[in-house]
Image (cartoon, helix red, strand yellow):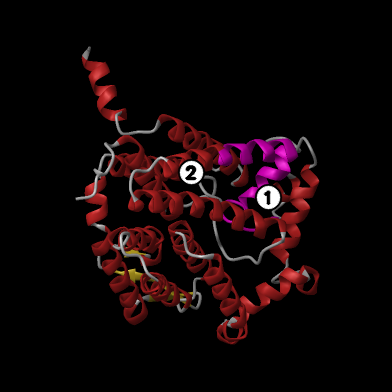
Amino acid sequence: MTEPMRLWHYLTRYVDSFLLSGILLLMLTGLFTLYSATDANLGRVTNQAVNMLVALGIMWLVANIPLQHIMRIALPIYVAGVLLLLGVALFGEINNGARRWLNIGFTRIQPSELMKIAVPLMMAWYFDKHEATLRLRDYAVATLLLILPVLMIVRQPDLGTALLIASSGFYVLFLTGLSWRIMGALFVAGAGSLPILWSTMHDYQRRRVMTLLDPTQDALGAGYHTIQSTIAIGSGGILGKGWQHGTQTHLDFLPERSTDFIFAVFSEEFGLIGNSLLLLLYLVVIGRGMIIAANASTQFTRLIAGSITLTFFTYIFVNIGMVIGILPVVGVPLPLISYGGTSMVTMLLGFGILMSIQTHPKLVKT
């Protein structure tokens, strides 16, 4: 084997090529869409390309970590994440009425992003440890492990991140085999707690919910995002208006067009056919993730692979749902497409874990 071949084998031996192909195609789509959404701002596109390279590097590093080490860091990462959230609550910086960032001297961090991976890792580790004697009490403990960080993040307030973390934990509970009767009881309890949740919500959060029912009641305020995004999507038609020819985008009617509402930009320019191809790409990545979960050798790897994949699906569903007006605007990016580095790193860290599960020797419990 030649030296270049040895190097290539070393770099790719723990990389799932099928999953990576889907990820790279989505990233490329994101760069093209961002170029149009920012009116050909090369600086912004270059920054995003750097974010992607950093995230891919982290994904590669995590993919090379043996599964035993991933299991061992589950508890320390969770404890560190909760302590950092406590630090945010006590000493965090307040921006626009929200306390989400923690200044650690040389930089600022958002600990809630860490919990998107830490919570399902911790819950999967806990269920794996108690797999042989799994009882209702274990489900209760796992639920507490989920509720604690979710409530701390809701207080910041950051409903979008709290929703994603709650869903990642729910998927672990579901994949563990929680009975439908218990899930039904939890659903009823959740529905019954809605009045309490409503009373604790901020005014702007309540307006978002009410605007979902009728965006025109505040067409120039809380309903503006939804109205403009649905106009953009509808005006794209079947074939779209063409790359860089979206009127809602380039006449500055569409807000947050490089981040939360970038799907509206893509829809206006590429239409129904473009949307279908984009969703097909997402389906390829999700399908590969579910295959990895189905082939996992242990309870831990099956639960974490399934949770990561289904949480990725939740990102897509929530973002597109809020852009087309069937869900409230909660600030969830379109994965691998929206501008931003933090969520990109978090998602590719999760994909790195998927690749480690797929490419390393099967984990055998000792």
Looking at the image, the residue that sits furthest to the top is 2
What's the residue type where badge 1 is placed? Ala
Q: CA distance from mark 1 to mark 2?
A: 28 Å
Q: Position of residue 278 (x, y in %)?
A: 62, 39
* Residue behind mark 1: 264
Q: Position of residue 43 (x, y in %)?
A: 48, 43
Q: Position of residue 260 (x, y in %)?
A: 58, 56
Q: Is 29 rendered above or below residue 130?
A: above
State the SS at label 1: helix
**Image check: 268 left or right of 38?**
right
Image: magenta residue range: 254-283
**Image check: 68 left or right of 307?**
left
Q: Mark number for residue 290?
A: 2
Q: Position of residue 132 (x, y in %)?
A: 30, 60
Q: Which badge, 1 or 2, is on the more N-terminal residue?
A: 1
Snapshot quadrant of residue 72: bottom left
Snapshot quadrant of residue 145: bottom left
**Image check: 362 left or right of 248?**
left
Q: Magenta stretch containing residue 340, yes or no?
A: no
Q: Residue at x 24, y 43 (%)?
A: 66
State the SS at label 2: helix
Prevalent SS, magenta region: helix
Q: Are marks 1 and 2 in contact (CB under 8 Å)?
A: no
Snapshot quadrant of residue 332: bottom right
Q: Is residue 40 visible?
A: no
What's the residue type where badge 2 is placed? Met
Q: Is residue 131 visible?
A: yes
